[in-house]
Amino acid sequence: MAEVGEVSEGCRLPVLRRNQDNEDEWPLAEILSVKDISGRKLFYVHYIDFNKRLDEWVTHDRLDLKRVQVPRKEAKTPTKNGLPGSRPGSPDRDPNGSARRAVAAQPGRKRKSACLGTDEDSQDSSDGAPSAPRMTGSLVSDRSHDDIVTRMKNIECIELGRHRLKPWYFSPYPQELTGLPVLYLCEFCLKYGHSLRCLQRHLTKCDLRHPPGNEIYRKGTISFFEIDGRKNKSYSQNLCLLAKCFLDHKTLYYDTDPFLFYVMTEYDCKGFHIVGYFSKEKESTEDYNVACILTLPPYQRRGYGKLLIEFSYELSKVEGKTGTPEKPLSDLGLLSYRSYWSQTILEILMGLKAEAGERPQITINEISEITSIKKEDVISTLQYLNLINYYKGQYILTLSEDIVEGHERAMLKRLLRIDAKCLHFTPKDWSKRGKW
Amino acid sequence: MSKLSFRARALDASKPLPVFRCEDLPDLAEYASINRAVPQMPTGMEKEEESEHHLQRAISAQQVYGEKRDNMVIPVPEAESNIAYYESIYPGEFKMPKQLIHIQPFSLDAEQPDYDLDSEDEIFVNKLKKRMDISPLQFEEMIDRLEKGSGQQPVSLQEAKLLLKEDDELIREVYEYWIKKRKNCRGPSLIPAVKQEKRDGSSTNDPYVAFRRRTEKMQTRKNRKNDEASYEKMLKLRRDLSRAVTILEMIKRREKSKRELLHLTLEIMEKRYNLGDYSGEIMSEVMAQRQPLKPTYAIPIIPVTNSSSFKHQEAMELKEYKVKQDKPDVIRPKRKYEKKPKVLPSSAAATPQQTSPAALPVFNAKDLNQYDFPSSDDEPLSQVLSGSSEAEEENDPDGPFAFRRKAGCQYYAPHLDQPGSWPWSSPKEGRLGDVRYRYCLTTLTVPQRCIGFARRRVGRGGRVLLDRAHSDYDNAFHHLDLERFSSSQHSSISQFANTSETNTSDKSFSKDLSQILVNIKSCRWRHFRPRTPSLHDSDNDELSCRKLYRGLNRTGTAQPGTQTCSTSIQSKSSSGSAHIESATSLGLVHEILNHTDGSKSLQSSEFTAFTAEQYQQHQQQLALMQKQQLAQIHQQQANSNSSANTSQGFVSKTLDSVSAQFAASALVTSEQLMGFKMKDDVVLGIGVNGILQASGVYKGLHLSSTTPTALVHTSSSSAAGSALLQPSNITQTSSSHSALSHQVTAANSATTQVLIGNNIRLTVPSSVATVNSITTLNARHIPRTLSAVPSSALKLAAATNCQVPKVPASSSVDAVPRENHETEKPALNNIADNTVAMEVT
């Protein structure tokens, strides 16, 4: 059994965690950081095979000190490894701790970068040499710039309007604000302050009651505002900082100029409160119609995410294009998109009517055109739903009873929908306006 | 099963897929295995994360149940949604507008301080409030300014006082508080802000640096040609804009000068009023005192004589001639300084004493040219000769009045050590040594006798003073036969002209009295005989007298002119005599022309003085006369045919005898004119000349419109342009005033006639003619009003580019002064210069 003092960065050990069903679990975790607050040691742990957003500071009594795996210092010289408890060179390069991870991750990254663009390959190969990331898109899959700082959450809590949010990931708010117990944000302009008094003072001066953009959609209490990342830098940056707290792969490396931000709000007597948003490149070379997309945690699991996605496809329909979200998707992103795609495609398939005694039929391209969902996403959804079957020399789509019932049930619960009639949107040709 | 080896076809996105319900296909299960042939699509997630426990659980739950179970969802950190004080801190109700919200651009930039007061500040402000008047917002504004005024280092108290508008005491209090707070602050500023990237690139990996600028260049179009064109357009735009800036700058300067002048005038008036100077006595006294302060630019009308320094030996004109010929370089700068400012203020330098607002040429043509008009006139040679003055233009305290070199001109250093510039000053001093003021044989009328060598000066009140000089031959002179001499003087002018070409080569002084007489007779020596003007014949006599002087004058001063014209070639004194010969011959041509064509005597009035500038004029006049004659011949073919022909013949003969160096230009012109006469065709070379002269006209008129001082002279000398150039001959012109004016008007009318006969646009020549004729009456106003007209005439002349307009163009030149080097420029550029000038003024 190791002493508490011997548990250092890079060590792996089971850590007590309470799951959704309020049961105690002891998943394996990695110590990312250790800090000492008034004699009491705190350990920042990442639960292996759990998402980073669940990483947290724990006290020593949650550590299973009996089963500590001490990291070996060098992967190349495993036999002459360092002493237990000695500090490893770099936690995220720890070969022992994340050996499985590294093996699993590296090829995956390579493959992804290959499909995302050739320029990323070179970045991967020149790993270690600092180079600026690519300038398009809003997400990074390349983690060569990751370090211990960005792997850890740096904001304890954010107060936004009547909500308090627990950030999931690192966000580059001004460093002097990171140690605060609560970071106070103005819910309309998203400006950050270090104290409630600051927020109060700010509110006497800030007269915004809605995102500072043009309202392009309103139905009921739901509105969408369009904000140009070049024209309204301050708001765009504040929004990005907030969003970064909940989007692991989002990068804030570059400015917001090439993006448009579509902020979804819900109106009440105090004003238009931000619910979520998605950003979109003014010009995408890869058919992306969404760069980052986020429903703020207080509004999650209530259909707003799907509403955002639906809205993004409505925009694409107006533009007459098909689109797809920028990759990589997060776990929640994948679930949400799959859900949206499934429902949208099933809606079409079930709506097909037989003509003149013949079987109803449809091409993948037709589905894509109707929905503005990119062809690849249509195919992957059909596959995921297991609809594509090869039957008697040709491909057919088959709708099982489970699928139909499940869909009908889900659609009953999906009450929030975008009404295309309420959309007042004219796409701009950004290529003619000069870049960004 | 054998079916497993069956390879399915690729999924074709454009191929219709029939949609079945599973219950309709009971045998589907048999075919199910083949589905694997369709390649699996990537999920779009990072592989590493795809395997995460909660996701996999959620996915499988969804696949199993068709929907997510509450306990199967992906867990996220909790959010709290009941902030008790929310209602209190977020102000009142906000009514939803009926219309969709549209934000007005820039409406977001409210002038509110970015700094938000915290509780610590509040305590301080509340404490301060007891002593001073300060509100939280004011405090925030102060901190905001201090923060934004500071870089890495906080501003000093002194700077803070500049930044803030509050009382010093308040500033000090807040400043001290701020400095203290800033020292304890964790961040770089009290207004928290996202870290900016550093310029040196060291912040590439700093995770707190965000929103870096995209340094990648904007992608330009692939079409290169297009790029170049637009690039050029941008350059042009930039040039145009900078021109506009220059012009505005000039206007600003002009207006400032105007205002200054007004203020000064006001001040002077006030001072005069205070002094009680109602009659202007003190004023004029002061002005008189001020006068010597600017001798270089002074117009030498004031009869202050400093010629007493003349020595007896130098009184001999012949010697003086020699000296003068040997030192042409000494003479020229004086001429420049005396004339330039008056002749061409618009292109070169403006003289300071032209303080009238209208006379202020507030721009410099070069300023405007520096951005555009890739001037064809900038010959490499001329640029070498006269260094570009662009460097000087910067930081010149004289502003628009600064002297600026003109490309293509040669400038000589001024002789600052030499006083005075009077016409009677010795050539040894680099002065003109005008013949009329040299010592010459003089014969008095009333006690009719020859008094030997004397010279005239203009004394007070316009009186003519005679300075006498002693010579060894005084006795001999006293015995000269005056009657014989006077008769010889009255003999034909052409005789004088014919013999004059030999006079300068006569260097030895004959001791024989008869030889003296012969010399006098043959006009080798000049002889002055003032006459009491009689009512009837005064005109003629004066004229003839004048002509005598004129001829001599010509021989004496022709050389500088010649040299100026052959710009690059500085011929030395060895060829001096040849020049004089040619000049004389030219003069001869004029005389002959005058006599053969009885209706015209214009030319005789032109050559009162020869200067560098006038040489060109002279030549053009020659050409002009011929042209006019030709035109007249054209008109009245039958009538004057014979006489014109003879005169033409004479001209060519005379020109043949002219020495090669000088004649080049003149001869060519005359030959071309001959050719013109025969073919009635356009000769390009002359065409260019004509336009050049036209530009000269414009300049001259422009000048006269802006310089009242010059105008005075114009009126007094009755539009004889040369008089304007040389104001020093004022006595002479005034005495011969009536005769001259008569001649000029005659000439003008003749010119106009020619013009009309040749079907030229009437506006141009007629306006010029009006200028000419009216100047004799009222020269002060008319040229100013007409100054705009010749510019259009210029354009016309340039546009038509035909032989005909050249006649009026050059004819108008006669009446106005002009600068020789200007005429050497190609026409288009001149016009460009002038049109720009017009736009500005």
Image (cartoon, helix red, strand yellow):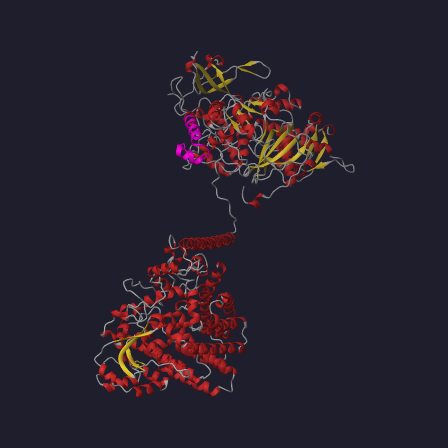
Front in this rendered view, residue B820 or A236: B820
Work out whether residue B467 can be spotted: yes
Above or below B200: residue B505: below
Specify whether residue B724 is painted magenta. no
Q: How many marks?
A: 0
Above or below B667: residue B290: above
Work out which quarter of the rendered image holds the N terminus of chain B and state it. top right
Above or below A386: residue B608: below
Work out whether residue B46 can be spotted: no
Magenta region, main secondary structure: helix
Front in this rendered view, residue B62 or B85: B85
**The magenta stretch spans which residues?**
B151-180
Residue B124 percent across, percent down from the top left:
46, 24
Above or below B80: residue B262: below
Residue A66 percent across, percent down from the top left:
46, 12
| Residue B730 picture quarter | bottom left
Residue B556 percent across, percent down from the top left:
31, 76
| Residue B167 picture quarter | top left
Front in this rendered view, residue B209 or A306: B209
Furthest residue in direction right, as rendered: A356
| Residue B182 picture quarter | top left
Q: Is residue B352 left or right of residue B504?
A: right
Residue B645 percent across, percent down from the top left:
45, 86
Specify whether residue B178 is painted magenta. yes
